[in-house]
């Protein structure tokens, strides 16, 4: 079971490689990837250096080109594919059918991983991408139960990668337009969700208010942990009660079900967080390396202490195993 | 002045209604001025007030009234039983299907059936459009977040390849799908024990910000826009941008029938359709931002 770690910059890449990642994933400095944030991602030079560093230590480098090009901007995506392939990237992580076809027009067998943004949640969807584009692996959206993941891993025509840790998208990725509904920019089109440029914090009557493009996302009393106003994790009013209608600010942590994921034949565990610091990448990579080695090499279940030890790195300082457990759904 | 009248389509009811409500609604639709009717469950496989045979009976009724019937399909498919039902729909030859997941495209194309690509299929560029056309796509329902500028460089290809373009002009927009059922969550139930509480809400549940502004509409595992998209006053612009089919997404049964009538009357008698919101029973807020390439929730004009 491979460990796939995020690298938002060169420093994080070093930390991930040194911490024992089997692969790191990166993005270019444009909207072709789903973490198109200011100050993040790689220049050509950094990619070359990063690939050298990783390859010397037997670690692979994947590049995410996993947003959806609109026709007027199509060229930016094809030149990004060219750039990544020419620089010697090992694998491209892709969501768009057109981009996959472009990659296949360049190479019949260049490794393609189906991005979580393609939202493939069932066997026939995987068959579609496998038969049309020969995908090597698919990253599953965070919407399936453990039983469903296990079933898919058994029957899928390709390898299966699942999310292990990090921010929790509760919607089927690639099919969520909430961010563009509220800001005009979405993961699909711009590689952003609830973009920082639209965020505003205000103190009002002793309460801290977070807004996204002027819409009130949440209101915090003194001493309350005020999280980033990701639009699906705020408190809203429904039938005159104020609640976390969609989800609490919480992160995903599947360390507790690692033995089950392993015996289901899951090929790789993905850690979310290219937007996080090198220190985060360092700590999470090392913890997961240890956990995976424990499970795979020694058949050892991860201790509760180690699992909860990761919570301080999590959004809202709390974690869940999310949709893997039916009761969350 | 409108030279050619577009076709009008009615999307599948996104909400969960009783069998009696569906039957009564589609009997009215049968005599309403709409050209294409999509039917079937698109949101949650636990909603089973209608069996496949019931839907097919409605399909026959609508066909007999001169409508083109399209069998719509589930958007988020997880369980094998869901794939089994999908397989029945996508492999039959009597009706066109609307694919809302690539799984439906896979099954339809394996069976050499043509299909409509629903708005949850991400077609954002010509290369994707062409590939799906080769696999049997005859009509493209544009993803909700694409607007007029995004469409411009795609119209020609679609026309050349005889792929019809359909764009939502009325109704709440489907914005997200989750493993979690938000209606059940609101009632403090889990999805597995949901008691089908969504049956109580004819058109979902409104969620406001704490300041009382519309945020979203929850509808089982689907999240919709709280505001109703309304491009009726942009009809000319839509036609000029090559939109062949105007899509209405049902709200309440009574208001849906009224909107179909208004849009159709408008094309028959006026230079540009006029919308009279005061003739609707529901109190809706409107938006059209996506068409103008801005926030979907905003209203231009």
Image (spheres, coloured by chain):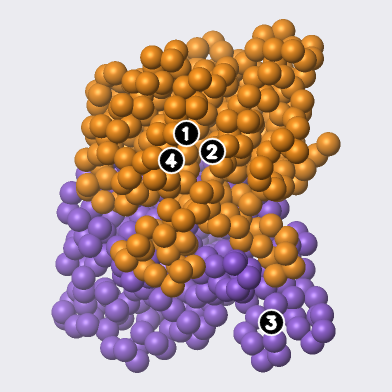
**Which chain is in orange here?**
B
On what subunit does the disc labeled 1 rest?
B
Q: Are marks 4 and 1 in contact (CB under 8 Å)?
A: yes
Reading the image, the residue beneath label 3 is A220
Quarter of the figure that contains the C terminus of chain A: bottom left
Which is more toward the observer, A160 or A247? A247
Q: What kind of element bears circle 1?
A: helix
Vertical position of residue B201 compared to residue B289: above or below? below
Which is more toward the observer, B182 or A49? B182
Is residue A32 visible to us here? no
Image position of B109 (left or right of B229): left
Reading the image, the residue beneath label 4 is B21
Q: CA distance from mark 2 to mark 3?
A: 40 Å
Which is more toward the observer, A298 or A258? A258
Which is more toward the observer, A32 or B297? B297
Q: CA distance from mark 4 to mark 1?
A: 6 Å
What residue appears at the point 77 percent right and 62 percent down from the top-left corner? A214
Q: CA distance from mark 4 to mark 2?
A: 8 Å
Of marks 3 and 4, the one in the foreground: 4
Vertical position of residue A316 compared to residue B22: above or below? below
Mark 2 / mark 1, whichever is N-terminal: 1
């Amino acid at each position: 079971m491979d460990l796939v770690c995020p690298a938002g910059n060169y420093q994080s890449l070093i930390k991930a490689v040194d911490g024992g990642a089997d692969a790191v994933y990166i993005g270019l400095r444009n909207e072709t990837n789903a973490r198109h944030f200011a100050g993040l991602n790689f220049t050509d030079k950094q990619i070359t250096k990063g690939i050298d560093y990783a390859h010397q230590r037997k670690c692979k480098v994947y590049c995410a080109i996993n947003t959806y090009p609109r026709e007027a901007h199509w060229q930016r995506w094809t030149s990004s594919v060219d750039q990544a392939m020419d620089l010697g990237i090992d694998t491209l992580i892709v969501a768009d059918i057109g981009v996959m076809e472009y990659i296949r027009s360049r190479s019949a067998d260049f490794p393609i991983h189906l991005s979580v943004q393609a939202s493939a949640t069932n066997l026939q969807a995987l068959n579609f991408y496998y038969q049309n584009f020969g995908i090597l692996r698919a990253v599953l959206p965070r919407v399936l139960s453990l039983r469903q993941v296990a079933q898919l891993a058994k029957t899928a025509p390709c390898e299966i990668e699942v999310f292990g840790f990090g921010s929790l998208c509760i919607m089927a990725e690639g099919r969520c337009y909430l961010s563009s509904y509220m800001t005009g920019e979405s993961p699909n089109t711009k590689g952003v969700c609830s973009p920082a440029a639209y965020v505003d914090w205000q103190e009002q009557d002793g309460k801290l208010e977070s807004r996204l493009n002027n819409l009130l996302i949440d209101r915090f009393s003194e001493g309350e942990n005020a999280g980033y106003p990701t639009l699906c994790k705020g408190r809203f009013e429904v039938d005159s009660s104020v609640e976390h209608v969609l989800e609490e600010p919480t992160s995903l942590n599947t360390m507790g079900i690692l033995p089950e994921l392993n015996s289901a034949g899951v090929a790789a565990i993905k850690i979310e967080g290219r937007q996080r610091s090198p220190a985060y990448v360092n700590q999470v990579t090392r913890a997961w390396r240890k956990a995976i080695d424990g499970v795979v090499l020694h058949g050892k279940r991860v201790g509760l202490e180690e699992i909860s030890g990761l919570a301080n790195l999590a959004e809202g300082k709390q974690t869940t195993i999310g949709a893997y457990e039916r009761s969350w759904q | 002045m409108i030279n050619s009248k577009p076709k009008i389509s009615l999307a599948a009811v996104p909400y969960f209604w009783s069998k009696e409500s569906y039957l009564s609604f589609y009997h009215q639709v049968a005599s309403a001025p709409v050209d294409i009717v999509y039917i079937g469950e698109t949101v949650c496989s636990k909603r089973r007030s209608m069996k496949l045979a019931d839907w097919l009976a409605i399909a026959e009724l609508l066909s007999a009234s001169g409508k083109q019937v399209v069998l719509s399909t589930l958007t988020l498919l997880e369980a094998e039983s869901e794939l089994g039902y999908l397989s029945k729909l996508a492999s039959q030859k009597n009706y066109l299907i609307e694919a809302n997941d690539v799984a439906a495209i896979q099954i339809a194309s394996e069976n050499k059936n043509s299909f409509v690509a629903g708005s949850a299929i991400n077609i954002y560029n010509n290369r994707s459009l062409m590939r799906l056309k080769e696999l049997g796509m005859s009509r493209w329902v544009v993803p909700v977040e694409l607007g007029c500028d995004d469409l411009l460089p795609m119209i020609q290809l679609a026309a050349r390849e005889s792929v019809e373009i359909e764009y939502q002009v009325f109704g709440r927009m489907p914005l997200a799908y989750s493993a979690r059922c938000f209606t059940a969550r609101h009632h403090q139930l889990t999805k597995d024990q949901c008691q089908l509480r969504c049956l109580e809400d004819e058109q979902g549940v409104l969620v406001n910000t704490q300041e009382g502004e519309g945020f979203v509409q929850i509808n089982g595992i689907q999240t919709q826009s709280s505001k109703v998209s309304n491009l009726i006053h942009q009809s000319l612009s839509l036609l000029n941008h090559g939109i062949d089919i105007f899509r209405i997404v049902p709200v309440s049964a009574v208001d849906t029938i009224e909107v179909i009538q208004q849009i159709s009357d408008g094309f028959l008698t006026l230079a540009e359709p006029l919308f009279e919101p005061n003739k609707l029973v529901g109190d809706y807020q409107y938006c059209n931002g996506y068409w103008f390439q801005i926030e979907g929730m905003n209203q231009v004009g």
